[in-house]
Image (cartoon, helix red, strand yellow):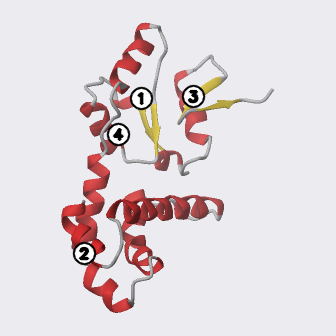
Amino acid sequence: MTEKFGDKLRSHGLHPQLFFHALQLAAERDLVYMDLAGQEPVSLPERWIENFAKTLYQAGLSREVVDSIFIEDDAVYVTNAWVNGLRPRPGFGEMLEIFKEGGIDFYAASGASPARVRNYFDQAAIDLPDDRIVDFLSVGVHKPAAAPYKFIREKYGDKYDTIIFQGKLLRESG
């Protein structure tokens, strides 16, 4: 992503990694707020593109500078690179293989598109059937809502009351 914007951002005192992190947080925050307000869900990439110029403004750049940096085709390119560029951490595939060997089923519930999630698991050489990938938009909410996890439990008849996700536990009360 930095090949399109890195030099432009650095020339205005912005670190590309920090900018893209701020862009990601702004997009995710907007999606959560939209859910809370009962608005129709949109995809994370759509929010990225909508937040691109706004995040540059928030970084303190003037309208003229933002207009010189922000070209929508470039923003679409960077968004696609982000969406399709996620790579698993080292050891992720091995960890899931240990789960599988131990009889633990796993599913992927994500705010990302099913294609992005599929790419992620393919990169880790993990065989995950498409019917075990649930995107939050198909359930009509965004992270961190519990609905997609409950949807998976209901769909697959999960007999357990604990779901591990993003290093946290989700437990049903009662």
Q: Which residue is mark 3?
A: 164
Residue 107's image quarter?
top left
User: How far apart in space, not on screen, are marks 4 and 1 (Cα)?
Assistant: 11 Å
The local crowd at label 2, few if under 14, some if 14 to 19, many if 20 or more residues have their Cα within 10 Å, is some
- The residue shown at (30%, 24%) is 126
Q: Tag 3 or tag 2, which sits nearer the N-term?
A: 2
Residue 117 is marked as 4
Residue 13, position as x, y percentages in the image: 35, 75
**Label 3 sits on what residue type?**
Ile
Residue 64, position as x, y percentages in the image: 32, 91
Dot 4: what SS?
A: helix
Q: Tag 1 or tag 2, which sits nearer the N-term?
A: 2
- The residue shown at (63%, 18%) is 160
The local crowd at label 1, few if under 14, some if 14 to 19, many if 20 or more residues have their Cα within 10 Å, is some
**Label 1 sits on what residue type?**
Arg
User: How far apart in space, not on screen, are marks 2 and 3 (Cα)?
Assistant: 40 Å
User: How far apart in space, not on screen, are marks 2 and 1 (Cα)?
Assistant: 41 Å
Dot 1: what SS?
A: helix
Q: Tag 2 or tag 4, which sits nearer the N-term?
A: 2
Q: Which residue is mark 2?
A: 8
Dot 3: what SS?
A: strand
The local crowd at label 3, few if under 14, some if 14 to 19, many if 20 or more residues have their Cα within 10 Å, is few
Instruction: Please state which of the two labelled residues, at mark 3 or mark 1, is closer to the viewer.
Output: 3
Residue 11's place in the image compared with 159, above or below, is below
Tell me the quadrant of the picture where the C terminus can be found: top right
**Label 4 sits on what residue type?**
Val
Cβ–Cβ below 8 Å for labels 4 and 1?
A: no
